[in-house]
Image (spheres, grey):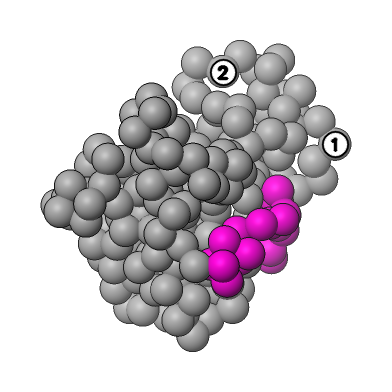
Amino acid sequence: MRVAALYDIHGNLPALDAVLADVARERVDAVVVGGDVAGGPMPAEVLERLAALELPAHWIEGNGEREMLALEGADPAGLDPYPAIEAWAVARLDDAQKERLRGLPPTVTLDVDGLGPVLFCHGSPRSDEEFITPFTADERLAEMLAGVAEATVLGGHTHRRLDRNAVRGRRGRVLGAAGSRRRAAPHGLRHPRGGGGDPGDGHAARRRDVPPPDAARAGGP
């Protein structure tokens, strides 16, 4: 199947809409929502847009979901900037939206055209808080991938794009963010065709520069 992987949206609706325009053009078969979805300036609107997708959507948990839900009822004024954003965001979700974010699985595996089974996670297969970067030692990366049967692992979390080849026969990929708290960043759209950011096997991550939403105008911290 053809899969669009959307990671680290962080409540950025304009960036998400730019991504979804690509998703519609590519006629993918399914979407993976890769965690850290709502913590940002337009949390409810982002969840409404994703709920309206007319595609099978596979959600996985990011550290942002867990941290945001843990701050339900907290006063943003008494918090540091990062948790203040999360507390402000969760207060704008209705009960159904908060329930949608509870208890999400840490990973999902889908059979992707041209790649076979791909494991989708947020940070690493074993933790949504771990970072995979160009500087991650092979030995540490091998520990993160221990027990993983899939030859390709795809994640996010860092807001930076990375294609990391063959550690014990596996390939690790990190997508950019659909939207970050500070600015719109590269989004992750994987499809079995050539295009921007094609690492050589026809599965591309594309960049779209989108003006970020103004949290202050939405009453944000």
Identity, as a three-letter code, of the amino acid under mark 2: Thr
Spot occupied by residue 87 in the image (x, y as percentages of width and height): 44, 43
Q: Kindly identify which numbered label has been placed on residue 94.
A: none
Left or right, residue 212 beside residue 112: left
Q: CA distance from mark 1 to mark 2?
A: 18 Å
- Quarter of the image with the C terminus is top left
Badge 1 crowding class, 10 Å Cα cut-off, few under 14, some 14 to 19, many 20 or more, is few
Quadrant of the image containing the N terminus: bottom right
* Residue 105: % across, % down: 72, 54
Ranked by sequence position, the earlier of labels 1 and 2 is 2
Towards the viewer: 139 or 66: 66
Image location of residue 18, percent across then percent down: 26, 65
The verdict on residue 194 being magenta is: no
Name the secondary structure under disc 2: loop
Is 93 left, or right, of 167 in this rendering?
A: left
All told, the count of numbered labels is 2
Q: Which residues are magenta?
A: 95-113
Q: Is residue 118 above or below residue 21?
A: above
Label 2 crowd bin: few (<14), some (14–19), many (20+), radius 10 Å: few
- Residue at the far bottom: name it: 54
Q: In the depicted view, which residue is nearer to us: 180 or 145?
A: 180
Residue identified by numbered label 1: 147
Instruction: Tell me where residue 66 sits by quadrant.
Output: top right
* Residue 125 in view here: yes
Identify residue type, mark 1: Gly
Q: Position of residue 166 (x, y in %)?
A: 64, 32
64 w.r.t. 187: above or below = above
- Checking the image for residue 136, the label placed there is 2
Q: Is residue 68 visible?
A: no
Residue drawn at point x = 49 percent, y = 67 percent? 94
Q: Is residue 156 placed above or below 108 in the rendered structure?
A: above
Q: Quadrant of residue 109?
A: bottom right
